[in-house]
């Protein structure tokens, strides 16, 4: 009789928090003689990069019908909606499902006990150290975990009769920058230094301690600092942080117990981790254990990046040689019991098929070079086969950029075997597989030559002759052209040895592609003009391009670094293309002249810094009184010089940027109108809608419907 199987859908399975949850799941599952399959990406970058995020295709390998239950760790994902297809497949099969740290329709929700944990941590500062003046640094204001952790502190304050001051609560990002910003406010005397600061996670606490210590502030003599979650890395920061270990392991156990109807338990353990950021001091035995773990991880990282392994893989010419090298270096996969390489049978062809797979298996004892050909619906059963003991299997994508080869599967007999060194190892073997593919592709050099002749290497856009040829084949009466001139007022600037202008042009090209459909044609001239040819929905497409370029580039670079100019024209002939490019050049030249005039203002740099901040974050733009104080001038004088410099009043400029942010959010997200209004700094949705109509000419709902026609047409054409 085959064992039960649980599936875990997560991101960055090597992350400390996710690893603790998975260990708890595996422990409870092993106790119930159940296998565990973990489907996880590797990098989970918090940026929209089409190559890096292509790894999320690993979730397509998950087939709910193969499992007896599924667990999703929602908190691991920046955007849980990316798993919508996974949720639908689970609902269709009607298997029991649990979501950890989130809420999904049809799934049981399980949360970490953040509220009680933070209450105990705050209780320690109040009862043991007798503190009453305590600041709290938590996460984003719209994040459920931020408020759960804050609620725990409130309960501790109420228990001891200490008034809770909302002004001593600071919302951050759960990342290092929040700790650095709070430290800066203390050091500049913008905020009084409290007796203690409770940080709602370790990242923010590390940054706060590092910044204060670097400025000469004594911790804990001047201020006590505590973290939360115990993510590791304590030995790399000064002083050693006092923190609290979130009970993620037990959360994983509870999720597995629910699905398996079991009662596995770890028992009660003390999770307060003493450090030298409070007067309790370090626990020597705890610190020695952490240092031992860090030494092992460091050694594994060094070993896993051995140049000899990469060199031997690069010399391989066939799959047989490739699999043999993997077998010879299997020892680099620390504590792994088996390795499965599951390659699409058409892995070296133009397109991924995903019907049948070549499955290679290797371990410490053998390295076979003859694969088994396995259909997709039999892939899981061939990997998770019958054996004496249950195991945990980690499914990861094997791909080079957007070329998918298949997946790797690591099998472990212990719950905590998987570690972060696998990231570099997996990328190394994927790169080697692409090298083998190129060596055996007789068309490769021809394709490279054709690409260099027809396409621009930096942007991937057509060169102008090819663009004109493609444009000539379209219906002129239904086509329109948008020219985007990327102008640089200064000579070439270099940042860390890199050409800043090339980075900006490449970023503009990426933004344009993301804003368009698959039907547009792109071109680049030698004068840094990017041309887009669009069809019947050209107005909506061009609007989306303008809005996203403003958000992605103008919000990042100042007008003294780059000026983006636009020109539109109907038609698609060569004359039309040349005319629209000249028009964009003319607009750009006028903008540069205006810039040089602005630079003659005595306070131009201060005004530009202020305006750049408004463009980057209009929600927190200072009012005109605060803005004038920054420049140490009167409100009236400030309003005069601002309008003379930028051609619009300060208040109207702030409104314009808020509306521009709203247009961007309506273009690129599914946020409600109310949420968009809040995100742009409006507290009244009706007032926001009225101001939007005054500036754009239609309501936010009408604007979104107009832009949604683009996506609707794509769906229609695909069907």
Image (cartoon, rainbow, N blue to C red):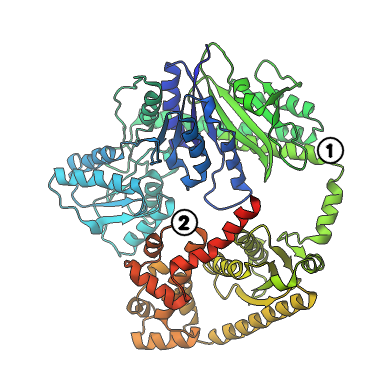
Residue 179 screen position, x and y as percent: 38, 53
Residue 226 screen position, x and y as percent: 31, 44
Viewed as shown, does residue 582 lie left or right of 119?
Answer: right
Residue 685 visible in image: yes
Query: How far apart, in angstroms, are the residues tagged by discs 2 and 1?
Result: 45 Å
Mark 2–mark 1 CB contact (< 8 Å): no
- Most foreground residue, 299 or 704: 704
Residue 631 screen position, x and y as percent: 39, 80
Residue lying farthest to the left in this orientation: 161
In the image, residue 601 sits, relative to residue 581, either above or below, namely below
- Look at the numbered disc 2 and give the secondary structure of its residue: loop
User: How many numbered callouts?
Assistant: 2
Sequence-first disc among 2 and 1: 1
Residue 634 visible in image: no
Marks 2, 1: nearer the viewer: 2
In the rendering, which numbered label is found on residue 670? Answer: 2
Decide: few, some or many residues near mark 1? Use Cα within 10 Å; few <14, some 14-19, many ≥20.
Answer: few
Residue 592 sits in quarter:
bottom right
Residue 155 screen position, x and y as percent: 20, 44
Viewed as shown, does residue 422 lie left or right of 172?
Answer: right
Residue 500 sits in quarter:
bottom right
Decide: few, some or many residues near mark 2? Use Cα within 10 Å; few <14, some 14-19, many ≥20.
Answer: few
From the image, tell me which residue sits under label 1: 440
In the rendering, which numbered label is found on residue 86? Answer: none
- Look at the numbered disc 1 and give the secondary structure of its residue: loop
| Residue located 50% across and 28% down the image | 7
Residue 193 sits in quarter:
bottom left
Viewed as shown, does residue 131 lie left or right of 679?
Answer: left
In the image, residue 272 sits, relative to residue 320, either above or below, namely below
- Most foreground residue, 715 or 515: 715
């Amino acid at each position: 009789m085959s064992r039960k199987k649980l599936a875990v859908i997560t991101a960055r399975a090597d992350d400390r928090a996710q690893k603790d949850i998975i260990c708890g799941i595996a422990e409870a599952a092993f106790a119930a003689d159940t296998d565990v399959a973990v489907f996880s990406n590797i990098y989970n970058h918090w940026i929209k990069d089409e190559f890096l995020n292509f790894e999320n295709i690993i979730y397509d390998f998950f087939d709910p019908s193969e499992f007896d239950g599924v667990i999703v760790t929602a908190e691991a994902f920046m955007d849980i909606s990316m798993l919508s297809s996974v949720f639908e497949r689970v609902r269709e099969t009607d298997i029991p499902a649990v979501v950890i740290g989130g809420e999904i329709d049809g799934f049981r929700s399980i949360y970490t006990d953040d509220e009680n944990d933070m209450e105990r941590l705050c209780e320690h500062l109040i009862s043991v150290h007798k503190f009453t003046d305590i600041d709290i640094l938590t996460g984003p204001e719209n994040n459920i975990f931020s408020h759960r952790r804050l609620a725990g502190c409130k309960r501790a304050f109420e228990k001891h009769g200490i008034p809770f001051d909302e002004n001593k609560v600071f919302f951050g990002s759960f990342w290092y920058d929040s700790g650095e910003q709070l430290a800066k406010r203390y050091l500049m005397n913008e905020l009084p230094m409290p007796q203690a600061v409770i940080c709602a996670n370790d990242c923010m606490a590390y940054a706060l301690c590092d910044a204060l210590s670097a400025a000469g502030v004594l911790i804990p003599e001047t201020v006590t600092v505590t973290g939360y979650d115990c993510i590791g890395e304590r030995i790399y920061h000064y002083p050693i942080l006092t923190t609290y270990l979130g009970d993620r392991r037990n959360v994983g156990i509870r999720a597995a117990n629910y699905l398996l109807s079991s009662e596995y338990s770890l028992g009660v353990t003390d999770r307060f981790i003493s450090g030298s950021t409070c007067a309790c001091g370090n626990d020597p035995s705890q610190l020695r254990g952490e240092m031992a773990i860090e030494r092992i991880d460091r050694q594994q990282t060094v070993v896993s990046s051995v140049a000899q392994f990469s060199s031997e893989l690069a010399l391989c010419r066939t799959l047989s040689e490739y699999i043999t090298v993997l077998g010879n270096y299997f020892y680099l996969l620390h504590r792994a019991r088996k390795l499965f390489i599951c390659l699409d049978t058409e892995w070296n062809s133009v397109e991924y098929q995903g019907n049948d797979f070549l499955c290679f298996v290797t371990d410490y004892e053998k390295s076979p070079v003859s694969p088994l050909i396995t259909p997709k619906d039999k892939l899981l059963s061939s990997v998770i086969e019958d054996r004496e003991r249950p195991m945990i299997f980690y499914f990861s994508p094997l791909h080079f950029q957007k070329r998918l080869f298949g997946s790797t599967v690591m099998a472990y007999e212990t719950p905590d075997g998987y570690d972060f060194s696998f990231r570099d190892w997996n990328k190394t073997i994927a790169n080697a597989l692409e090298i083998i593919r190129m060596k055996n592709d007789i068309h490769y050099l021809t394709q490279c030559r054709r690409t260099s002749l027809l396409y621009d290497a930096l942007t991937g856009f057509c060169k102008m002759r090819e663009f004109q040829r493609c444009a000539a084949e379209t219906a002129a009466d239904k086509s329109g052209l948008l020219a985007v001139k990327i102008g640089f007022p200064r000579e070439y600037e270099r940042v860390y040895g890199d050409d800043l202008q090339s980075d900006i042009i490449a970023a503009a090209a990426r933004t344009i592609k993301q804003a368009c459909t698959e039907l547009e044609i792109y071109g680049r001239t030698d004068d840094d003009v990017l041309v887009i040819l669009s069809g019947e929905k050209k107005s909506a497409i061009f609007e989306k391009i303008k809005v996203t370029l403003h958000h992605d580039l103008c919000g990042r670079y100042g007008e003294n670094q780059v000026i983006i100019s636009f020109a539109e024209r109907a038609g698609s002939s060569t004359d039309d293309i040349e005319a629209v490019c000249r028009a964009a050049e003319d607009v750009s030249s006028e903008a540069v002249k205006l810039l040089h005039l602005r630079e003659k203002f005595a306070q131009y740099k201060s005004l530009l810094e202020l305006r750049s901040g408004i463009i980057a974050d209009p929600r927190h733009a200072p009012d005109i009184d605060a803005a004038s104080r920054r420049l140490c001038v009167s409100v009236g004088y400030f309003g005069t010089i601002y309008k003379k410099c930028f051609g619009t009043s300060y208040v109207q400029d702030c409104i314009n940027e808020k509306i521009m942010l709203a247009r961007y959010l309506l273009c690129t997200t599914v946020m409600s109108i109310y949420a968009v209004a809040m995100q742009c700094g409006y507290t009244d949705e009706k007032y926001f809608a009225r101001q939007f109509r005054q500036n754009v000419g239609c309501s936010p709902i009408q604007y979104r419907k107009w832009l949604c026609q683009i996506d609707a047409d794509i769906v229609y054409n695909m069907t």
